[in-house]
Image: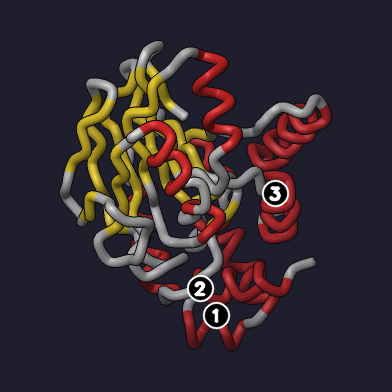
Amino acid sequence: MLHDGKNALVVDPGVAQPVLQALALEGLQLQGILITHHHGDHTGGVAELRQTTGAAVFGPAKETVPEPAVKLAHGDTVPLLGLSFQVIDVPGHTAGHIAFYCEAADGIPLLFCGDTLFSGGCGRLFEGTPAQMLRSLQTLAAMPANTRVCCTHEYTLSNLKFAREVDPDNAALQNYQQHCLTLRAQNLPTLPSTMALELAINPFLRSTSPAVRASVERFDAQGCADNGAFATLRTWKNQYQ
């Protein structure tokens, strides 16, 4: 949820009740619902929220989302809370996945990236190809270093466990893992992250680095040669326990 003290927007509400409780607690009116992709854990609360609050719904033009919705494509903008959110195509996790980017929210860039980029990881490829996901991640990685990365699942600790397997000598990654362990021990979120941090610790943004590539080749040299380091890295993560 993002709000200005009076109005609010929510991103990918899988269920309605926590949103309604937060609105009541803060005395807010829900102005808009942003949807990054069609999966039920991101859209399940949309109908109830719209019926209860009258909020407008904005979602990807290339996917089926709860109607009625304003359908968005790359380059569109969404004006909410006095801010302007740019729509960016980021296929990979799903075929029509989009992200929302605000150049300055309280003076700092803000990214709602759905299930494309996680802290220390990236989304599974349910509908897109490795090449599509890599391009999508490269698009996000080109954003300003201080961009706040608001992804939609608290997967950070499990992602960092895998990242340490891939990039064991990365000091920034080691320090971040300890920081996140401390946060979660206090039941605090690890998110949002920043783009600078992800570029330093996320193996999926570092698949061309010598250290990550060497690990990927040890996992499957032939797969790395045939499909590229990123595709093989994603396959490794799918199998990792």
- Left or right of 170 on screen, residue 146: left
Along the line of sight, the residue nearer the viewer: 108 or 233: 108
Q: Which residue is mark 1?
A: 224
Residue at 33%, 35% (x, y): give it. Answer: 55
When the figure is inspected, residue 146 is found, relative to residue 116, above or below; the finding is: above
Residue type marked 2? Phe
Q: Earlier in the sequence, mark 2 or mark 3?
A: 2
Q: Which residue is mark 2?
A: 126
Q: Earlier in the sequence, mark 1 or mark 3?
A: 3
Residue type marked 1? Cys
Residue type marked 3? Leu
Q: Earlier in the sequence, mark 1 or mark 2?
A: 2
When the figure is inspected, residue 67 is found, relative to residue 103, above or below; the finding is: below
- Identify the mark at residue 202; answer none if there is no mark: none
Q: Which residue is mark 3?
A: 160
- Left or right of 71 on screen, residue 197: right
Q: Position of residue 11 (x, y in %)?
A: 43, 40
